[in-house]
Image (spheres, rainbow, N blue to C red):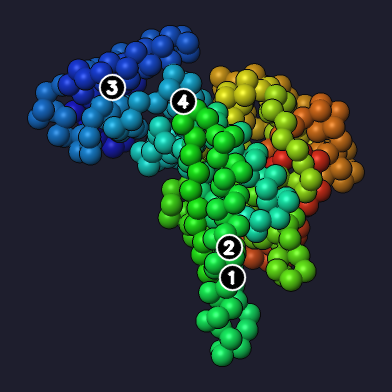
């Protein structure tokens, strides 16, 4: 049964279930993860209905550590189990461990998020938006994802002209949307699909609202789109989405042609990663493409703490190396130079929340990279 809060106990893993196929798979994955980590931790199988009810889980199979439920109704992979167990049983502060448990309980590492089933692709039907969509198709093919192609429009006109203009813009968007889907659909494979949505309203709130409410795992969009009559500068839209969403954003540079992801640069600051959900999309992409990750950090002074150990923990299971430079020159120039030196075809950075005054007077490295990255930029979010 669950342990009382604050009670000192020997680590114990409880496997909750009734012997179903998912239960057996979870047990096998758990045993493999413990073996890979050389951990000798007892697994207690809970099958009695009365005992199961005491854990107050919504469904089985479920996994608990010392009475605290980590996963339920999902079967995490061996790699994800290894990451969680490594943090909870081998290292990390108490606050980090609490955050890992909280994220797991919220299904931050459940099957849907791990498989990137839902990808949102905003479009203004420009050439760069088309490049972003073709890139999304390649990602979707790896995971069998559903792409939702989203177009937003806003009418700027007098009251007398409003209805006729809105109707025309919506019909025009529908026509272009249908043509776009017909071009892209033949490229999809492995169970990948595409659907469309047309929404009236400002682009940034429409995109971020749909991303959050629709349970999307990734937003893929261009950094510069149509201008002129459409009055759209997608670069500012991409930056606005990046700042307002909690969903990872993959920004595709203007004119970029898709390349398979074989080398990834993960540019980090000296802060740590608060939980495995932060790097989940990066890890899944690296696994799917069998890519190597080069972790890059530039110290600006001798007092710099270097690369935090949690970066290593949450990249566990994928090939990665560490590169540290001490240089006071422009950070973005250093990052772009490193990307060029290693011929990386994906750059990844973490965006952190800033206070109001700091946001007013400081332009973050992730913001600048949106506009001048030589490779597609994956923006992760860490609010821990």
Tell me the CA gap for discs 4 and 2.
Answer: 41 Å
**Residue located beneath label 1 in the image:** 169
Res. 271 visible in picture: no
Foreground label between 2 and 3: 2
Label 1: state its secondary structure.
Answer: helix
The earlier-in-sequence mark between 3 and 1 is 3
Give whichever of 120, 334 is nearer the camera.
120
Tell me the CA gap for discs 3 and 1.
Answer: 49 Å
The earlier-in-sequence mark between 4 and 2 is 4
**Residue located beneath label 3 in the image:** 22
Label 4: state its secondary structure.
Answer: helix
Q: Which mark is residue 301?
A: none
Tell me the CA gap for discs 2 and 3.
Answer: 44 Å
Q: Quadrant of residue 224?
A: bottom right
Q: Quadrant of residue 297?
A: top right
**Residue located beneath label 4 in the image:** 80
- Residue 9 is situated, as x and y percent measured from the top left of the image, at 30, 24
Left or right: residue 351 versus residue 82 is right
**Residue located beneath label 2 in the image:** 173
Foreground label between 4 and 2: 2
Q: Are marks 1 and 2 in contact (CB under 8 Å)?
A: yes
- Residue 262 is situated, as x and y percent measured from the top left of the image, at 70, 24
Q: Are marks 3 and 1 in contact (CB under 8 Å)?
A: no
- Residue 61 is situated, as x and y percent measured from the top left of the image, at 25, 27
Tell me the CA gap for discs 4 and 1.
Answer: 46 Å
């Amino acid at each position: 049964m669950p342990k009382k809060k604050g009670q000192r106990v020997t680590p114990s893993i409880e496997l909750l279930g009734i012997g179903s196929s998912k239960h057996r798979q979870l047990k096998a994955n758990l045993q493999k993860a413990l073996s890979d980590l050389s951990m000798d931790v007892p697994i207690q199988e809970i099958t009695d209905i009365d005992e199961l009810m005491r854990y107050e889980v919504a469904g089985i199979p479920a996994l608990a550590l010392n009475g605290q439920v980590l996963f339920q109704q999902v079967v995490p992979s061996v790699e994800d189990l290894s990451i969680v167990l490594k943090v909870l049983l081998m290292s990390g502060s108490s606050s980090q461990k609490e955050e890992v448990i909280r994220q797991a309980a919220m299904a931050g590492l459940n099957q849907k998020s791990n498989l990137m089933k839902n990808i949102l692709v905003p479009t203004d039907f420009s050439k760069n938006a088309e490049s972003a969509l073709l890139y999304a198709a390649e990602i979707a093919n790896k995971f069998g994802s559903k792409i939702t192609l989203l177009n937003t429009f806003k009418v700027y006109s007098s009251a007398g002209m409003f209805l006729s203009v809105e109707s025309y813009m919506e019909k025009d968007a529908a026509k272009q949307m249908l043509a776009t889907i017909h071009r892209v659909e033949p490229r999809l494979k492995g169970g990948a699909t595409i659907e469309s949505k047309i929404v009236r309203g400002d682009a940034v709130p429409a995109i971020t609202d749909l991303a959050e409410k629709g349970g999307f795992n990734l937003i893929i969009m261009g950094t510069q789109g149509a201008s002129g009559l459409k009055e759209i500068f997608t670069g500012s839209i991409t930056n606005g989405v990046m700042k307002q969403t909690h969903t990872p954003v993959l920004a595709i540079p203007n004119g970029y042609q898709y390349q398979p992801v074989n080398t990834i640069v993960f540019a980090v600051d000296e802060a740590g990663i608060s939980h495995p959900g932060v790097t989940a999309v990066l890890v899944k992409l690296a696994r799917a493409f069998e890519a190597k990750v080069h972790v890059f950090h530039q110290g600006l002074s001798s007092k710099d703490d270097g690369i935090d150990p949690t970066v290593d923990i949450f990249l566990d299971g994928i090939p990665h190396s560490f590169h540290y430079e001490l240089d006071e020159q422009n950070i973005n120039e250093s990052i772009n130079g490193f990307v060029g030196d290693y011929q990386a075809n994906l750059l990844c950075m973490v965006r952190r929340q800033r206070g109001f005054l700091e946001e007013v007077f400081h332009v973050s490295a992730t913001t600048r990279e949106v506009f001048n990255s030589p490779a597609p930029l994956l923006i992760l979010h860490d609010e821990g």
